[in-house]
Image (cartoon, rainbow, N blue to C red):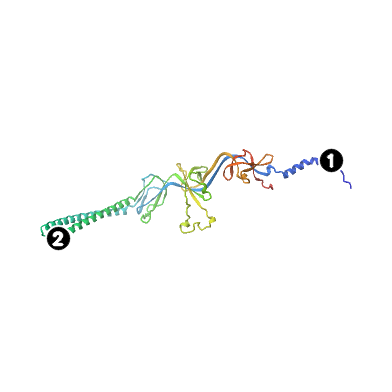
Amino acid sequence: MKRPRPTRRAWLLTFALLPAVAFAAWQAVAPSRESLMTAPVTRGDIENSVTALGTLQPRRYVDVGAQASGQIRKIHVEAGDDVREGQLLVEIDPSTQKAKLDAGRFSIENLKAQLQEQRAQHDLAQQKFRRQQQLKAGGATREEDVQTAQAEVRATQARIDMFQAQIRQAQANLRSDEAELGYTRIFAPMSGTVVAVGAREGQTLNAQQQTPLILRIARLSPMTVWAEVSEADIGHVKPGMTAYFTTLAGGARRWSSTVRQILPVPPRPLEASQGGSLTGGRSGSERVVLYTVLLDVDNADRALMTEMTAQVFFVAAQARDVLTVPSAALQANAGQVQVVADNGDVQLRTVRTGVSDRLRTEILDGLSEGDQVLIGPAAGSGG
């Protein structure tokens, strides 16, 4: 059977549909810019830093305790008061110390009276000895009586020395009692702010067993941040490194500082100090070791307070107003990125990188501002 030949009209319709079919095929097969995830090369600041949490504490403080036992008669300050060095803080009932001091004085007076009596006995013994020597010269006494008189002189002199030593000992005890009486009035050892009061008026203190803590005085400027850095990051933190921190109360405010000291030993767990496991009962894989890093900051405006929580950033490197790209653009090929042209073509370029903050990376060479870099296929592109 002979097939019919296409008519002129059929040929014209076929040629008219060819461009539309070709465009649809290109849209389905060829990569388009809309099917790719891209990001522009932009200018900005980059900072490579180690983050940690810390607690604010006064750089210098002193715990004021009691060296004398007794009942607290008066506390002259409250928490938050500013005090100057030498200011009277606390008074303890001095009745016991005064009685002890009086007893010491009476004891010394008694010893001095006995000393005077003994000196009189010594003078008498010397007179008897001299008389015995004169009688011996005239042959009117025995040698034994002379020796007895001489021994009495020596004995009375020894008792004089003994009483003198007892008086010196009693005088030393008296000075100790006077000092203890002075301890019933407690003065500020330095200027600062009373940050805590741990005793109450009427409370009885026993300084013989341990030194009771009454209050704490601190200088609130400068303050010290005690930051806890994990063992994975501690190798990147060095003394003198630039750092800054923020607080919840400070809002967007930043406090700048430098690392003063890195404590070489992490705080010991409580269980270890009580004879337990160093890991606190957890397996080695679950144990997190934190090292303490100290940094000081001026606090003249008193915006920082004791025990505040600080978010600390230790700056390892930083760059200002530089070209940056998302770090994801560099993951596929180290030192290379894929640049997407306006027509959808993808070009591979070698770049030189600088500082990275894990999210963005500084580009030193190889790209221009505004270039579109490939960071991955679009969701659902099938590629």
Left or right of residue 79: residue 114: left
Q: CA distance from mark 1 to mark 2?
A: 174 Å
Residue 339, image x, y percentages: 65, 41
Q: Is residue 19 above or below residue 203?
A: above
| Residue at left offset 54%, top offset 41% | 318
| Residue at left offset 29%, top offset 52% | 172
Camera-side residue: 186 or 63? 63
Residue 20 visible? The answer is yes
Camera-side residue: 273 or 59? 273
Residue 4, image x, y percentages: 87, 44
The residue under label 1 is which amino acid type? Arg
Q: Is residue 51 above or below residue 286?
A: above
User: Which residue was labeled with disc 2?
Assistant: 143
Left or right of residue 123: residue 282: right
User: Which residue was labeled with disc 1?
Assistant: 9
Q: Is mark 1 in CB contact (under 8 Å) with mark 2?
A: no
Residue 82 visible? The answer is no
Residue 205, image x, y percentages: 37, 54
The residue under label 2 is which amino acid type? Glu
| Residue at left offset 13%, top offset 57% | 133
Residues packed near mark 2 inside 10 Å, few (<14), some (14 to 19) or many (20 plus): few
Q: Is residue 25 above or below residue 173?
A: above
Residue 260, image x, y percentages: 46, 45
Farthest right residue in view: 1
